[in-house]
Image (cartoon, rainbow, N blue to C red):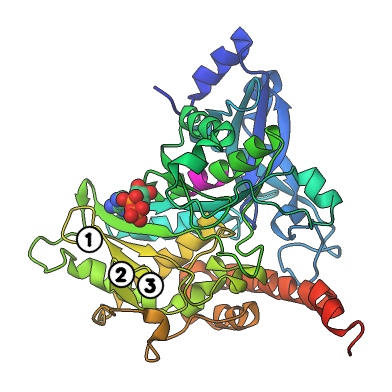
Amino acid sequence: MAGTLSFEQLKSQVAEGGVDTVLVCLVDMQGRLMGKRFHAANFVEHSHAETHCCNYLLATDLEMATPDGYASTSWQAGYGDYVMRPDLSTIRPMPWLEGTAMVLCDILDHHTHAPVPHDPRAVLKRQIARLEAMGLTAMMATELEFFLFEKSYDAIRASGFRDLAPISGYNEDYHILQTTKEEGIMRPLRNHLHAAGVPVENTKGEAETGQEELNIRYAPALDCADHHSIAKHAVKEIAWQQGHAASFLPKWAADKVGSSSHVHQSLWQGDTPAFHDADDALGMSQLMKHYMAGLIAYAPDYTFFLAPYVNSYKRFAKGTFAPTKTVWSVDNRTAGFRLCGDGTKGVRVECRIGGSDINPYLAQAAMLAAGIKGIEDKLELAPPTKGDVYEDAAAADIPQTLRAATETLRSSAMLRAAMGDDVVDHYTRCAEWEQEEFDRAVTDWEIARGFERA
Ligand code: ADP
């Protein structure tokens, strides 16, 4: 059976010589795998208990900068260490890398060994624990959309990110012929992930040249986020191995559709789907209605966690399948929230707001917090919207810019109560820094527009 490895299984594979390297990884604020490559012998003998990393890893950006303004660490505080404690239930092979296994870590304070509250895995675990206290579990699925490019990352970087030819010449939505041409990347991706215990459902061509979608079977929220991070990492590594590049930038060209990460959500009571009520016209339980009302009411509060960069907001455009409105609908792809599987035990809500750049731990945690609040306050769900929601003037908008989403995050009493002030302040600073860095940049657009004519 393909899947994760027990520690004992890893030990025997190391003893037999099948595994010589263990990647010991945390998931950073940007959702990336960061960590160290251990010699497998050292890992099984010593480092499986814990290792260390510099604490700036959870206070940095995509460029590995050292921004000021974080309470958790700074130059003044000396950028000390965190403990990385391997979660031994996440050991798995990485079959696309020779002789390599991996493990995900929880991040602990160096001195007290208490969980670091803004560690993305800790942020999600906190909301999962709140649900558990209510006798509920969350089953989630995050879809991964991305673009494949003809050239490699290095060749594209050397071209100043100009040489961006997608791997296909036409819109490949559901296209079997075109996606056959991409099987050099996509087939190993499906098979290697399956062997790594990531329950791949399918891949398909998406609605743009070179655009792909990877679907993974729904799982308990923490597993779902782990699957997402590992799958995203695998997409990049396998594309690189084949001399190509894969990008999860939500919008890499103004005239092309962006990439999203839709999140399917349902709550369960043991094996019983708590969102299902056979007597309801759409099969939705009262619990589901309250949860969805919370998701909708608090969408502006958590938009940052679905759209964490300046670029994320370029995706929200009319007529592109990327939603701009905080309303729900029945199987209608123009609304922010879509009811799927209505009338069946698989009834669930799909949030369509998130971009391909989400951190899946933070996005799920924020949505669970909103849903829990809806349940606690018994929020009333408005009737579904119909038709083209883009043209519905009465429907509320999500924040339109990172600047706006930073303020709705900062002032969210709901998220402060659910996640803690320290966590909300930490990610507010993260959002501010991203905007500050952008504001310092001189863009190609400004130069082309003003160089001669200004
Ligand atoms: P779509 O028409 O959106 O592609 P799919 O049937 O392919 O719908 O399902 C999309 C995702 O929803 C899949 O990843 C699937 O595993 C997930 N999913 C199915 N049932 C549930 C559920 N009850 N809760 C959460 N996710 C689910």
Residue under label 3: 295
Choose between 71 and 299: the one closer to the eye: 299
Mark 2: which secondary structure? helix
As measured in the structure, the alpha-carbon distance from the residue carrying label 3 to the one carrying label 1 is 14 Å
Mark carried by residue 291: 2
Choose between 300 and 185: the one closer to the eye: 185
Which quadrant holds the N terminus? Answer: top left
Mark 3: which secondary structure? helix
Mark carried by residue 275: 1
Tell me if residue 226 is in the magenta stretch.
yes
- Rendering coords of residue 367 (x, y %): 43, 66
Label 1 C-beta lies within 8 Å of the nearest ligand 1 atom = yes
Q: Earlier in the sequence, mark 2 or mark 1?
A: 1
Tell me if residue 116 is in the magenta stretch.
no
Mark 1: which secondary structure? loop
Which residue is at a point 36% across and 70% down the rendered structure image? 337
Which quadrant holds the C terminus? Answer: bottom right
- Rendering coords of residue 207 (x, y %): 49, 57
Q: Earlier in the sequence, mark 3 or mark 1?
A: 1
Q: Is residue 77 visible?
A: yes
| Quarter of the image where one finds residue 375 | bottom left
* Residue type highlighted by circle 1: Phe
Q: Are marks 2 and 3 in contact (CB under 8 Å)?
A: yes
